[in-house]
Amino acid sequence: MTDHRREIEPEIDPVLAGRFSALATVGVPDVWADATARSRASKSLSDSQRSPSVDVVVTPVEPRGRRSIAPWVARLAAVAALVGVIALIAAVRRPITQAPNSAPTTTQPALTISPASVVVDRDRSTIEIEIAYRAEDDDGSVPNAVYVLREGAAFPEAIAFTGCLARDDIQTKLIQPSYAIEAGFAEATECGIGSIALAPGDRAAITITTTVLPAGAYRVALGGWSSDLFEVVAPEPTTTLAAQVPSPPTEQPQFTELSLQELPDGYSFESAVRDDTGDIQVGMVRFVGPAGQPDLVLILRATPDFFATPIELGRETWPVNGRTVVNDGEGDGRCLPDVCSVGVQWDDTTAVSVMWWAPVDTGVELGPEHTHESLVVIAATLMDVASDFYTDGSIAPDEA
Amino acid sequence: MEVVGQLRVEVVYRREHARLWRSLLAFTGDPDVASDAESEAFAQVLRRGDAVEDVSAWVWRSAFRIALGLLGKERSHADAARRLAADARIEHSVAEFLALLGTLSDQQRACVVLRYTGGFTSEEIAAMIGSSAGTVRVQLHRAHASLRAELDPNEIDRRLG
């Protein structure tokens, strides 16, 4: 078929093309972490609309670059502060050398969070903390949500657990002497937009029970305040006590290099790229199929416990070779016209998604045979590969 | 949106981020605005989840609209040129070209940037900016004429032989 479009398109001006190509000399910042943080703030805004009379505590947000933040962005940040999201980011990014409970803003209560113990057994971790409100005169409040954060991981992967002291929109609840948190949630908004009132001298003991946390250094964060670091060690049959650790991990985790032992008929290896330019190391292995068929893609992330959320949400799982493969699709998990995906936590540092992927610009759509079950069969052939299988680069094609 | 819902968007981000960011830089002339606009566009599509069928098209369209809003109405091309010249992240010749792009109308600049940095056809640009393909072609011709009139004539002669 004749491409009439080409005949009537204005020609590419070589001088302008040369000038535009020089833009490649400008370094491209990674904004993914910022986008995911903003998406959570946006979600908080929509939730807050249920209760327009909310008494918002505004946490100042550092402007980006030399531009001032637009009013609507500031509003998002203000509402996000209510559920501790922006404060949470600050807690994640706070250097370990900083006094852990120094006041980040003048509007936050002087709350101390002290880890008392960590008990690790085969199928759960139990963290006990004590909180104390040490302000002399002023009353304060903290939101319902409480987080367990892994030190050294990028946001939002750093959120190892999100729990609720309460699940309501009540702004003036009295603090209880003790809390037991056993359920984890995908979003802090599950806790509602309520908060707990604090008077000088208030104290509480909080017991948080999670699925097994990977070994590493963690903090507990509540309303923008975080505890000292404590260490979770590898699960053992006996009790392990918490211990202070002197410094956070400094090296970026590396994922275990994986590929497939067997490919579907007609598919062949295209590329394997390891990308260290973002907040976490990521990788992409791409296999191309016959004309009209979607690509088969592996996305690897150097992050622990990546699929805990879909598992906690009750998504479909399949036991495969001693590991758990989970439907990590969007929404209700159905395959979409352009992507269908399952995921598996391969080891402590490697989360891999196996997906049928039909890039929009190819016009290809997934067929009825491109199911989660077909991906589970493929995921069963995942294997370690030699260290020279991946090449360094960007998984964005135009940066490769 | 749950962590699991980020996967499809993340794939688009990894694939198109660099091209989109550079297009936004060319459109706005400001690296910070480019980052803000791209970040906000991806944040919004993350929030919408699978209500968005074509993530790529949605993000491109939204990012340019957000960028236009962030630029505001009280812009001074002279101020923008001074800021670009002082920005250590951007080579002098690139800063000059970005400042030159800033003299175009918003629509002309969007068309020429989406054509050259984005790699889109007139039909695709039209769908993105809510215009017709014919109008886009007219804007491209005008942008070409305007930019070439300002660029170094010796460079044009050299490249065209």
Image (cartoon, coloured by chain):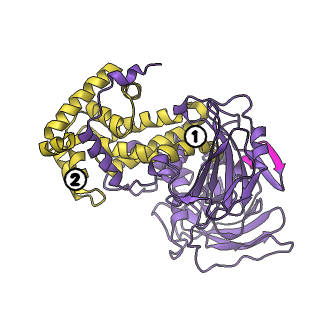
Chain colours: A purple, B yellow
| Residue hosting label 1 | A47
Looking at this view, is B118 or A381 the one in front?
A: A381
Give me the residue at 31% from left, 32% from top.
B111
Name the residue that disc number 2 marks.
B93
Q: Is residue B19 magenta?
A: no
* Quarter of the view holding residue A208: bottom right
Q: What subunit carries mark 2?
A: B
Q: What label sits on residue A11 in the rendered view?
A: none
> Which residue, as the protein is rendered here, is positioned at the far bottom?
A246
The residue located at (39%, 24%) in the rendering is: B123
Q: Is residue A215 visible?
A: yes
Q: Nearer the viewer, residue A71 or A273?
A: A273
Instruction: Classify residue A207 as left or right of residue A278.
Output: right
Residue at 57% x, 30% y: name it.
B53
SS at badge 2: helix
Range shown magenta: A310-319
Q: Indicate the amino acid at tag 1.
A: Asp
The answer to which of B111 and A67 lies nearer the viewer is B111
Looking at this rendering, what residue extends furthest in the front direction? B161
Type of amino acid at the residue the image marks with label 2: Ser
A362 to A187, vertically: above or below: above
Image location (x, y in percent) of residue A235 = 80, 69
Tell me if residue A138 can be seen.
no
Residue B13 in the image: x percent, y percent? Answer: 51, 45
For marks 1 and 2, give the one nearer the viewer. 2
CA gap between label 1 and label 2 equals 47 Å
Q: Residue at x 68, y 57 (%)?
A: A258
